[in-house]
Amino acid sequence: MSSDIQPAASNSAPAHPLVIQGGMGIGISGWRLARAVAMRGQLGVVSGTAIDSVMVRRLQDGDPGGDVQRAMAHFPIPGVAESAHRRYFVAESAGQKTYRSLPMYKQSVSVARQQLTMLAAFVEVWLAKEGHDQPVGLNLLTKVQMPNLATLYGAMLAGVDVVLMGAGIPREIPGVLDALAEHRVASLKFDVAGDPSSVSESLTFDPRAHFPDASAPLVRPQFFAIVSASSLATTLARKATGRVDGFVIEGFTAGGHNAPPRGDMTLNERGEPIYGPRDDVDLEKIRQLGLPFWLAGSAGSPSALRAARAAGAAGVQVGTLFAYCDESGLEPDLKRRVLDSVLEGTVDVLTDPRASPTGYPFKVVRTRTIDSQDDRRTRVCDVGYLRTPYRTNSGTIGYRCSAEPVDAYVEKGGEAADTIGRRCLCNGLLANIGHPQHRAGEAEKPLITSGDDLITLGSFLRERNRYSAAEVLDYLIGGGV
């Protein structure tokens, strides 16, 4: 394994792409998809969420094709790749087994735990960038606080070109990127439930704990904030801790988590949040910021791209179309079943205000042929990326999740009412990509998410139930733009 730190290749500022491929879920936007999009001259994006769990499960499945091990061989910190290989690699995977899990993240974790996260982010970005010189992005969720610093540094060691973050207010991330590029200590405010505003906790990452002799600076990636309101974009442009290079303006029809409606939450007859004019983004105010922006949410069509350009956007961010292409990480049989349901006209997308432990509305795909995670699941919290830090009665910091066993959640000071309807996104999303945990012979069930435009995907499919990322780009960009 490589042991010398090398400065990342000098990244020229990425030209503004017409299409940003969305950074979806856990492993859906994997390196194969990001690489395919990047090699066509658009911005391919890998998802960094839970990437350490994804990597160790790939290793325990035998690393088909040897891709993870090939990338690990280039990781510059001595001994890290070898240790991960010894601990997690299984030469022949029989499937239907219990994966060896990682210790769940806390405010402070060991150097080894940080390095495993760095390694995983490095591997994903390195593979996405292999064999070409086009820009590659990394998507992270602000609300998944604890792994983000180590994930960013690992991705930067691999030369990531753009970082995209939403699901919160990523005001501190630009300054973090500045610090990490110079191997300086980086920190983030650590939100702890129950703490008054006068009490401040932080997450801290010191590159020198991993590279004490590092001298050559890394390239600072561009930073695109994902926002759902012009007011947030304005705040970030003016008050972020460093340079913001652009915005993705995400509407409430996008897949995954959605921002809640502004004002009081009211539900329609299906139990979905009702959005109104107050939730529309004032694009004139976005334009006045003078930074490039892309529109997301029901943006996967040539007409949506043309409309975005006419509105002053550089282009669009597209998720759902890419989520079901050949190169995405979604398990192939699940792809086929969903696309068959689209062609049959039987697929449904529900904006569920209760499913996510975060409290944000979350879109759930429902079909008659996929047995998805529901209330019958025995509650287990053993992955833990969405756990909420809270202040215990003794003054220490504890961790709870409204999707964990109800008694445990209540014992930790949570309200039983907050557990109703909650799903384990961590386990469900890992099942989506073919890595379901097995317990006592039972496999975790998938929990698929997509944007609202999944229902109208039939016009693109034209009776086929598979297609490539290249076909998506030909459709979007070749459609008269």
Image (spheres, helix red, strand yellow):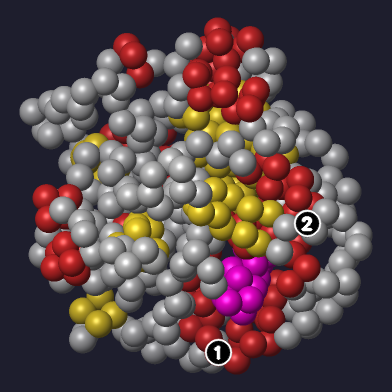
Give the residue at x 39% y 82%.
99
Give the residue at x 50% y 59%.
146
Please state the horizontal and vertical placement of residue 444, each as a whole percent of the image.
26, 70
Q: Nearer the viewer, residue 257 or 69?
A: 257
Give SS at disc 2: loop
The span from disc 1 to disc 2 (Cα, nearest Å) is: 30 Å
Q: Looking at the image, is 92 positioned above or below residue 344?
A: below
Please state the horizontal and vertical placement of residue 138, each as a whole percent of the image.
61, 49
Q: Looking at the image, is 173 positioned above or below residue 154?
A: above
Is-magenta flag for residue 69? Answer: no
Give the residue at x 21% y 41%.
352
Q: Amino acid at mark 2?
A: Arg
Q: Nearer the viewer, residue 179 or 23?
A: 179
Outermost residue, left side: 269
Q: Which residues are magenta?
A: 110-128
Labelled disc at residue 87: 1
Q: Earlier in the sequence, mark 1 or mark 2?
A: 1
Which quarter of the figure is the C terminus placed in? Answer: top right
Q: Which residue is mark 2?
A: 184
